[in-house]
Amino acid sequence: MDTPLHLQVTPAEGAPFEHPLRGDSLVLGRALDADLTLSDPFASRKHSRLFRSGGELFVEDLGSRNGTIVNGQAIQQPTRVGPGDVIKISNSLIRITAEAPAPARPSDDFLDGTVFRRASELLDRQSVPAAGGMDLRRYADRLKMLNEVHQALGRSLTLEELLELILDRVFDHLRPDRGAILLKGKDGGYQPAASRSAEGRPESLVFSRSLVREVAEKGMAALVFDVQADERFAAAQSMLLSGIRSLVAAPLLDPDGTLGLILLESRAGVRQFSEEDLELLVSLASVAGLHLRNLALAMEAAERRRLQEELALARRIQVALLPDRLPEVPGWELYGGNIPSRGVSGDYYEVLTRCDGRECVLMIADVAGKGMAASLLTVSLQALSTGPIEDGLPPDEICARLSRQLYRRTPPEKYATAFLGILEPTTGRLRYTNAGHNPPLILRASGTPEELGSTGVPLGLLPQAPYRAGETTLAPGEILVLYTDGLVEAEDPEGNEYGLDRLKEACLRNKGETCGGLAHGLARDLEDFARGVPFADDRTLVLARRLEV
């Protein structure tokens, strides 16, 4: 037989009351003909509905003006609820319980059972009492205490120091036998980060996972009057044998979720926690959560600064590997430039002479990926290519050797496209290998750009890959344009790519400029096209113009 459910209703106006949950449907709202009428002027006439389906209880919003909130989250569709869940309708609260509340007992009586309160609601309800009387004095004392805690926790502390100071204040004001702070880990679980006993020594607490879920994951504050009467602790024999009788717990609240919780225990005959203790712990936990969040933000900021410093250093090292100045080759004008998208670049280029100036090597490469990992691979690519280039090998043999070495040294998802050209300055003859790279352009005297297509797969993609060499000749006035895909794949606000055709048009418009002027014209056209959209990939450009005789 299903356990009968009840509703504990705290309306916006009037005294709290209980309502049994009978039947398969219950409409809530301010209308007099609603199944449960709420004294709440801001609730809709038919605001929400509780209904049963498939043996489960659900709540749905009936198109109300202010929405229906379950456990602090606005619902958009029917949502399953059960004992312990709290429904907020405008300024009214409805808590679902598995049994009717027991009659109130005198405050000095021993209470058996567990009380759950939503921590955010307890904080909201801590308003200034009327002038005069004990309540106002207690409120002033609490404000003073919380201000002292704020000041104590506001110092520059490590995480360990902050947790110990939080426990200091908790033990000062609530006098538990044992206490612990559990923090949420990266795996989503909650583990003790600091603990102690009344004697001041570190203490290992046995805690209920179900209670932790209620407190940390649902943002509930818990008060257990009698551990022995709560089934959550039935299997915790070590706790029962240790004499622990009363328990109180509160979440460490954060705007983005719960950071963890504070858990306190007291032995039978020493003290029994009260609802006033619960409210005080919620206040202390709120202050502690704020400072833990501030500390986490400070640590994140320090880590970001460290990463930025490392990124700047990596960029300086990478720039040092790029040619600081290009060689002077008689009869030719040369240009090379690289702009990273993320501080460091996954692009690489090289322009150098060999064979006593009889040949000029033009190389451009684009490593798969972006950022630091890609930049490290460009360093490896530069180191591996130096030897075979200086040995005078032809471009296809250089690419074959580079590909084998990269394959052995890198994971499968890391590879590089590359273009390697060997130029004879006196004749304009260009022998080249295109290892899966964007097709370089030759701006011919005829006015029609020529593409140098692929002659092999990207470097490091396969354990053994054949590469062949292509050959062409540049006549006086013609320009070789090497580029990476950061140029042609740049996007405008509508998501359109710059593309190869537009690159050809821009090159032809600026063909009469110097190589530096041509590069500037391409950059200006690219900026005009992107219209402020950040460039997602590195952009590298190498130009070689054969001068008119």
Image: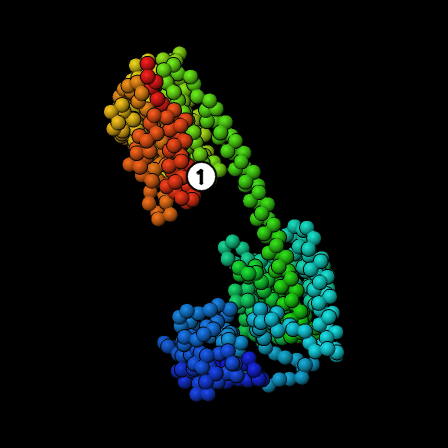
The residue wearing badge 1 is: 341
Figure quadrant of residue 444: top left
From the image, which quarter does the C terminus lie in? top left
Is disc 1 surrounded by few (<14), some (14 to 19) or many (20+) residues within 10 Å?
some
Q: Residue at x 46, y 27 (%)?
A: 322
From the image, which quarter does the N terminus lie in? bottom left
Horizontal and vertical percent position of residue 290 = 62, 59
Figure quadrant of residue 208: bottom right
Horizontal and vertical percent position of residue 204 = 63, 60
Q: Is residue 371 above or below residue 184?
A: above
Along the horizontal axis of the image, is 200 left or right of 95? right
Report the coloring of the rendering: rainbow
Would you say residue 83 is visible in this rendering?
Answer: no
Q: Residue at x 41, y 75 (%)?
A: 63
Horizontal and vertical percent position of residue 86 = 51, 74
SS category of the residue bearing label 1: loop
